[in-house]
Amino acid sequence: MKFIKRYFVGDTYIWLIYIALCAWSAIVMFSASSALAYKANSYMDPVISHMTFLAGGIGIVMLGQIIPRNLVRYGGIILCWASMVMLVAVLFIGVSDNNINARWLNIFGFQFQPSEFGKLSLILTLAHYMSTIHDSQSESKNYKIAFGYIICICGLIVFTNLSTAILLFAVSLTMMFVSGLPFLKRILLPIVVIAAIGVCGYFIVKVTPYESMPSILRRSYTWVGRIDRFMDKENEEDKYTVTDENIQEIYSQLAIAKGGLIGVGPGNSVERDFLPLAYADYIYAIIVEEFGSIGGIFIIMLYLSLLFRAGYLANRMKNSYDSIAIMGLASMITYQALLNICVATNTGPVTGQPLPLISHGGTSIVLTSCYFAIIMCLQRHNKLEEEEEKAATADAQLVTVQDLPEEEELPTEEILEEK
């Protein structure tokens, strides 16, 4: 018990959600990593690698919850500028594992996605500027600065990962809404403008020949194709014919259909051997196949519980930076999870977003763990400040009582009679 109180000092509910997600990830990865095991010629290597990242993530949360608040606040701004440099670098020297688009940087043998650092750093940077709004003048100034960061980070990410850019933009607007900015003037207008640009871009790509499109923008044809396939649900022949374009959607639906209510049982998945990226983007389909709709609903409830708990904590924060940052971090995890689930259940176009903490991927696990660490770090500092305030109030009351003049003794009845 002393060990738990000493090293697990963050919010208990957030810790329980984090541990539950890690536990689900470890269980499901034994089954979902069959394709990786085949490539590695070892059943345990992918699982051990995944478990190593999960263990490292737990260590990050334990250490991160005790770091100074100012290190989080101003370190996020520094990381934001570093992320911009990395996002520019990935356009020129990035590496890819599918020969389509480069999303990774390889530095001294360490491979990572700069977009993950961009997401975290932008959330912390926006929280800083949104929390320093005091009047109409500072609102206008900070809004312009914050939106400049949004355009830079999201604009650089969009070249390699459109879904991540859209997701980050949605989280950014959520943070602005939470900070109290006027909805119509500051939030709705950017949504309309970006939506108009997206619609125009869609039709431009449709009428532009592939050879005429600059190489850096040719990824847009993949996005348009995914949107078209998702929207075209009336073609019955293509619906039941497995092709290279729809193989993920078909086998994901088969896995979910086989799961039923209670599933086929842990480790008994069949579609894991046919579903591409069953260990990553479509791991939710394997969860439903093995644990049924009950298991799938439980996973959704874990992510929603994180968002609700973050809202409760944010409402109790005395520092506006803490409130906005906590909501931004929790929103990113929850939105990403729901987007991944929509793709796996074929209720949204293919995006390539991993299921936070559950999908295979070292960068995603480490950065998501940083989200949890920062949430608990900010909550812990707020709790310490509350305790200090209570102690100071109690001391002040004690001093006040001690300083009161002693009351004079009233004369007894006998003395009064003698007088």
Image (cartoon, rainbow, N blue to C red):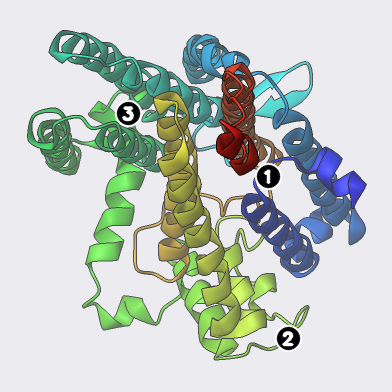
Dividing the picture into quadrants, the one containing residue 359 is: bottom right
Within 10 Å of disc 3 (Cα), the crowding (few <14, some 14-19, many 20+) is few
Q: Quadrant of residue 362?
A: top right
Q: Residue at x 55, y 56 (%)?
A: 281
Residue 359 visible to an observer of this rendering: no
Does 128 sit above or below residue 10? above
- The residue indicated by pointer 3 is 217
Residue 361: give its label: 1
Up-down relation of residue 168 to residue 305 (above or below): above
Name above or below for residue 295 compared with residue 11: below
Disc 2 to disc 3, how far (Cα)? 44 Å
Q: Position of residue 329 (x, y in %)?
A: 49, 38
- In which quadrant will I find the C terminus? top right
Q: Position of residue 325 (x, y in %)?
A: 46, 31
Q: How far apart in space, not on screen, are marks 3 and 1 (Cα)?
A: 26 Å
Percent from the top left, x then y, of residue 37?
Answer: 83, 59
Taking the spot 82% from the left edge, 53% from the top edge, the residue there is 46
Q: Earlier in the sequence, mark 3 or mark 1?
A: 3
- Indicate the secondary structure of the residue bearing disc 3: helix
**In-front residue for pair 286/374:** 374
Instruction: Tell me the SS state at disc 2.
Output: loop
Question: Label 1: how many residues lie within 10 Å, few (<14), some (14-19) or many (20+)?
Answer: some
Considering depth in this image, is 406 or 178 the residue closer to the camera?
Answer: 406
Sequence-wise, the earlier of marks 2 and 3 is 3
Lateral position of residue 73 relative to residue 229, left or right:
right
Decide: marks 2, 3 in contact (CB < 8 A)? Answer: no
Label 3 is placed on what type of residue?
Leu
Quickly name the residue at label 2: 265
State the residue at coordinates (36%, 26%): 154
How far, Cα to Cα, is label 2 from label 1?
24 Å
